Image: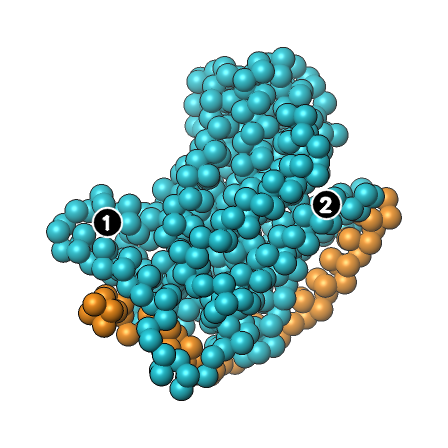
Amino acid sequence: MAEPMATLEDQAPPREDVLRARDRLKVIRTRADGRWLRLLWLLSGPGVLVMLGENDGPSMLSYATTGALYGIGFFVPFILLTFLMAYVVQEMTVRLGAATHRGHAELIFQRFGPFWGYFAMADLVFGNLLTLVTEFIAIQAGGLYFGLQPAVSVVMGVALVLASLAMRRYATWERTLLALALGNLLFIPAALLAHPHPKAVLHALAFWGPLPGGFNTGFVMLLLANIGATVTPWMIFFQQSAVVDKGLTRADVTQGRADTAFGSVVAAVAAIATLLAAAPLHAAHVDASQFNSAADFATALRPYLGHAGAAMFALGMIEAGLVAAMTISTSSSYALAETISARHSMNLDFHTGRWFYGAAIVSTVLAAAIVLIPGAPLLAMTLAVNVIATLLMAPALLFLLLLVNDREIMGGLANGRLANLAGGAIVIGIAIAGAGYGAMTVFGP
Amino acid sequence: MTPELLQALEAEQVTKRRFIPYPRRKLGRGVKLLLWVLRVYVVLAVPLVIYAFVRAAMH
């Protein structure tokens, strides 16, 4: 729990402050020298990580399913649109973090009271636990393609997540995850091996088509699933807390925006590449509607992408699950520790950050254990994840908008009229799409 | 070295300052209404989630 203020004041500067100050000193000196590219490099991270983290196992499966069922057409520009929406939402978290130096969960708790604070934290931690289960399913399925036993893949995944937590240094943790997240780009060579026709891609981008099969329930479900694959509650909590942990200030908002925009573009390219890689299945009339895992897709794609292409596809799925497991478990840590006023930073030692690290370790190990239970209702959990994430997106976005309009804490970084119009429209659209997706999943056939 | 180093942080970034909570926000009628709508939404959404999970688990 929170350490009493008197105790804190008597102590030497906390390790967290010293490490963050070192990072800030580099930023201050680089800015003074006018080295803008280096400055951008130093301040980048949370935006790219959150966007590539959201390109997780289930999301990449969703993009592959889209490519296999609809080919190159409507969904190519639609994916671009969803990442534009993600940018608008996530940009608000950069401003919130830089202006307040508080995480999303603690701001909700402090400004709206314990009821909403505990509600936001509990639904996020529970939703994240189920999402972690789906990430380990993706890791397991990707491993199966390479002949790895499920237990081996899952235990290796857990070991890597725990190793990432052992760094006790935000900057090292962030750069390591960024390097790992580059694996998301494996879908690009896989897509190139599918030899997509450039004219077809350009036509899809220009004319939002073709749309084989037209407007039907399956199309709407996939449409909503693609939105759900791009904007989710954990992203809001994660990026704001990461911005605070990294130490971004009001002066760094421009670089924070650039980081988020760059992350959106890279993640959109990887998502579209996944669609393109799976598009040969559409052309060959392979029924992919019953495919459940990365292994199913990689195996089916082998005749079209070759061994190397299929292997890159499966490896990309493992990476997607792994990076998402690292970022999502960290978002649970931030939210839990912020809500109970415990210390929360990737710069903490294990004793001081026991609640923070404990939340990530427990949720990771628990999710992995659930995946390995024989006969566990994994499909039900995957479905529940989608429903929870989409239904709870509305409250998360509402609080985001309320906080970013709170001039007492935001000052000059509060939303202007134009930002509210754009943000409000996107929030309403995503909330309606989310609720629709949830209802269709629950009441649909 | 450390005191000079810590000057690189803004006052609000120092741990002990970050643990001083913001005061509760004074909510206007509009926001209060929104939060009540949200309460109703949550009351409706939670059973939906439970139903979705149970139904999927049974199939």
First in sequence: mark 1 vs mark 2: 1
The answer for which chain carries disc 2 is A
Give me the residue at 51% from left, 37% from top.
A79
Q: Which chain is orange?
A: B
Local crowd at mark 1 within 10 Å, few (<14), some, or many (≥20)?
many
Pick the front one: A392 or A166: A166
Answer whether residue A379 is visible to the viewer in this image: yes
Amino acid type, mark 1? Leu
Local crowd at mark 2 within 10 Å, few (<14), some, or many (≥20)?
many
Give me the residue at 52% from left, 43% from top.
A323
| Quarter containing the C terminus of chain A | top right
Residue that mark 2 sits on:
A371
Q: Colour of chain A?
A: cyan
Disc 1 element: helix
Residue sitting farthest toward the left: A33
Residue A96 point in image, percent of width and height: 39, 64
Residue A209 point in image, percent of width and height: 53, 27
Q: Does residue A416 sit above or below B33 in this rendering?
A: above
| Quarter containing the N terminus of chain A | bottom right
Give me the residue at 66% from left, 60% from top.
A126
Tell me where residue A226 sits by quadrant: top right
Residue that mark 1 sits on:
A39
Residue A349 point in image, percent of width and height: 45, 63
User: Which circle marks residue A161 in the picture?
Assistant: none
Q: Does residue A120 sit above or below A194 in this rendering?
A: below
Pick the front one: A301 or A88: A301
Same subunit: marks 1 and 2: yes
The answer for which chain carries disc 1 is A
Tell me how far mark 1 sits from mark 2, CA to CA.
42 Å
